[in-house]
Amino acid sequence: MHRNKVLFVTLALLSSLSVFSQTKRFSGKVTSPEKGPIPGVTVQIKNTKIATATTEDGSFVLTASGDDRVTLVFSSIGFEPKEVAATTGVPLNVELKDDTRNLSDVVVVGYGSVKKTDLTGSVTSLKADKLKEIPAVSIEQAIQGRMAGVQVQQTSGQPGAGISIRIRGVSSIAGGNEPLYVIDGLPQFNDDVRGANGLSTINPSDIESIEVLKDAAATAIYGSRGANGVVMVTTKSGKVGQPRITFESSLGFQTIRKKLEMMNSQEYIDYSKAFYTNTGLPIPTDLANASAAINTDWQDEVFRTGALSNSSLSIGGGTERNRYFISAGYTNQQGIVMNSGYKRANVRVNVDSKISDRFSVQSRIMASRAIQDGFSPSVGDNIRNFGKSGVGSILRSITTVGVYNPDGSYTDTSPFSFNGIDVENPVAVAKEVLDRNTTTRVQGGLDFKAQILKGLSNTTRVSADFYHIRRDLYFPRLLPRLGNAIGSAELGLYDKTSVLAEDFLEYKYDISHDTYLEAIAGVSFQRDRFNSVDLAASGFGSDALKNYNFSSANTVSKPLTDVTESTIISGFARVRLNLKNKYLLAASIRRDGASVFAENNKYGVFPSVSAAWRVSEEDFLKESKWLSNLKLRASWGQAGNPAIKPYQSLLLGRTVNTGQGAGTGQAVGLAPTFPNPNLKWETTSQTNIGLDAGFLNEKFRLTFDYYVKTTTDLLALVQLPPSAGVGAGIGSGPGQILDNVGEVQNKGWELTLGANIVNTADWGFSVDVNLSQNKNKVTKTKDGKDIPTIAGGNDASGSNSIIRVGEPLSAFLGPKYLGMDKNGVPIHENLNGDKDANGVDIINALDNQIIGSPYPDLYYGINPSIRYKKLTLTSVWAGVSGSKINNFALFELAGPNVVQQYNKMKAASEFYPKPSLAASNQHFRSSRYMEDGSFFRMRNIRLDYSFNLGNSKTVKNLNVYASGQNLITFTNYSGFDPEVNTFNGNDRRQGVDLGSYPAAKTVTLGFSITF
């Protein structure tokens, strides 16, 4: 028995050794013609499913059981495929040639994809290898400064805050200016670009590519929603081969980029005394006896160094029939303001299955939860104005008092008898206020694809997106203004569900050996449902439960509930024709029906036509050694914009409370919103002419576009005369109606330059440059009348913009500052010549003129990359010029008056060296406070090192890096940061800095490891 056991074990060991001896190892390195490494090349044993991909340094290792000699197939987009015989144990050096017949990557467009060389429209693309260079929290951050014609602006430095994207300018007043996002086929708008950014719930590490469709030839396939451009986001899929596990982690630290120079205690006391002396008034007793012994720097008390950590784990792989990509991530970003921050957890599962030779299924599902803790931003009304905001309180607080009273309570930071009262202790706001957005999101979809006949396929797509936002706000009793010393609470619950169903046929057919036809036709149905509940209460006996127990409040307002639904149904078609690989023709049409518009205008038709001529494929250039690509493009098309709230065309009523019944506040009637039965689409017509060129096998590249983009039937809320009797509008103004009121034109050009200057085995140097210029002009308004940007008496935003024919949308309006007289009183241009009895200029609304535009004339980016062996240095520089910023804080805190005012900036002594009431009477929001918003900044710099792991069978790739964001900024803007826009999204009040959360500069260390 013992002998049998020994014999069995011996045979088992010999069998194992035999199997092991049959496992063969093939390795090598893949380089370009310039001897530079090529990462991401697929290496596959011919006629098998065994495959891998090259690492950052171009190396690969492949193991398989079987013969000592195999044929390896090397393939990568942009290079010619190659087959090489390999022998186990003998490293290969494989060189791939540039594929001059397919110079560019495949890019995703609406309902399909196309080689970039075959594009007839204007599309810009960023792939995953470029996206990962920036440690972005939100996907929009990854494209800042890297795409011509695309301006990306973070509206606030608050973690998780909104980011606005403008593609070829702004073209709407009320219809929205944000692009349409299509995430794995599901169209959606970023609903809140000022507060909780919905797109920040998506992990940038999960993204395979981002394409931006800019001209009408590219966007018209999305019809009524394509006027502002389309951002296509494609998430990652698994690749055929052994499972690849990737873990990425980073840790960074953020500090405020710039502090504002505020007066210290002595400077404030002296300036205040000077005001009273110059005005001829007695100095108040508390000011005369004031001491500068306490000198609190409120910025130092509130701002901090915040940590930023980000980790993600993914696994991908599969066979020819089933591929998978699974990921999970966690982000924790502390804000530079104490107690502010952003946390996000997310998971994703993407599966691609080939059920049979004719049927395949693609599934995508993502779930995330994000918590954003804010710092009480101003909302621009009298209840939550500048002083009652977090940043506003920092800047307004007087420095002569400390943070706490001797009894431990918070001090009153407007301690003098002549100070105003609209300010809170900023430390109390940071520590005690609950200001939180909690977002839960689930998004997913299924694509069923059936191959009906050769070249003919049908795709059925079903997708859904659900998100829930809980908005918690509580101002405790210890805050005398925001909390009214009794406690004030708000709770908002917002749900949005979007459901999409689409079905489209796609036909690809080679008419002849040099003629190729591609066509799609389909239908689409999308419905959005939005539910909201808003609660408000005040008068709490304790702050312990914050806003979690409304029943304990003395006063609870009536709950505001709302349900809205909107539906878009569509039919669409597109055809492409490729003649001899030289002449490219395309046309598309979409008919949309949208429930948000009036009965007679619910449907719109949006066509486009485009053509391209690949001059480089002509016989007289085809053999050229210096010209690798030359293509001329032209397109025209129309797209729409339905981004308005539902039911605007209908007569709706709401109950109002009155003082009847001895002040009972009884609801006695309806205040109707005025209907507009003629409400119709905004339509944007765009003409585009473009040029693509490549030289010396794409070593040098150029893309140029010129466009004219005209939007008609602009949607805007306009004032109705009081005689209309339709209830109050904003604030105390008369009623308003949504109407089609005019036209606006955007005209500009875009230039992208690229060069791979050096690409050898040891050295690499490349640079990409993009420049864009856009001119925005209102060409028509209703009856030629100006449209104000605000209405009513409840606005406290400091906005002074106007919509006027011949000027940009939301151009700044005000008097022109000329200088100072000998008494330190401002002088402004007196257009109408009015003077008072003493001969002093009377400056009023008649003297207002256009004093600037919130939009830049030029925006640009420079992206150099240097490689030495395994060390790579990349950077992203971006800038704008020509824009103006309405600096509200400068106007308020550098003024000459101290009565009912607050702390001052040091600049006040320069602006008004002789502060007085006379100077205050001439202190207007003039051109003096419309500051130059131009800047040039290093958005990101990153140093990578990729380790040589030799013959490691476990670790395929290890990369470590150090990066910095916003470390260098060149600007003359005096505020916290020139990249600011307090009111964004659909707001007419553009270019205003109303105490926005400051921008941070960040240093990050991280690594990525693949098994």
Image: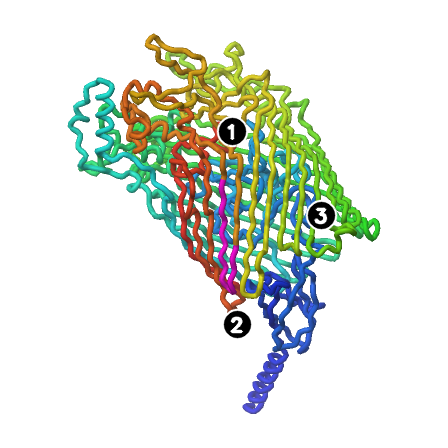
Contact (CB < 8 A) between labels 2 and 3? no
Please say whether residue 946 is visible from this viewpoint: yes
Q: Which mark is residue 229?
A: none
Q: Which region of the structure is painted magenta?
A: 865-879
Q: Residue at x 66, y 53 (%)?
A: 695
Q: In what element is the residue under mark 3?
A: helix
Q: Amino acid at mark 3?
A: Asp
The single residue placed furthest to the bottom in the displayed view is: 3
Residue 342 vertical position relative to residue 814 in the rendered view, above or below:
below
Q: Which one is in front, 128 or 345?
A: 128
Q: What is the three-letter code of the residue carrying label 1?
A: Asp
From the image, tell me which residue sits under label 1: 562
Q: Say which mark, if any, is on residue 950.
A: 2
| Closer to the camera in the image, 309 or 42 | 42
Find the residue positioned furthest to the top.
Answer: 837
The stretch drawn in magenta includes residue 869: yes
Q: Quadrant of residue 648?
A: top right
Instruction: Label the magenta part by its dominant secondary structure.
Output: strand
On the image, numbered disc 3 is attached to which residue?
Answer: 118
Q: Position of residue 692 (x, y in %)?
A: 67, 46
Q: How is the image coloured?
A: rainbow
Crowdedness near tag 1: few (<14), some (14–19) or many (≥20) residues, C-alpha within 10 Å: few
Q: CA distance from mark 1 to mark 2?
A: 63 Å
Q: Is residue 500 left or right of residue 419?
A: right
> Which of the 4 image quadrants contains residue 748?
top right
- Of badges 1 and 2, the one in the foreground is 2
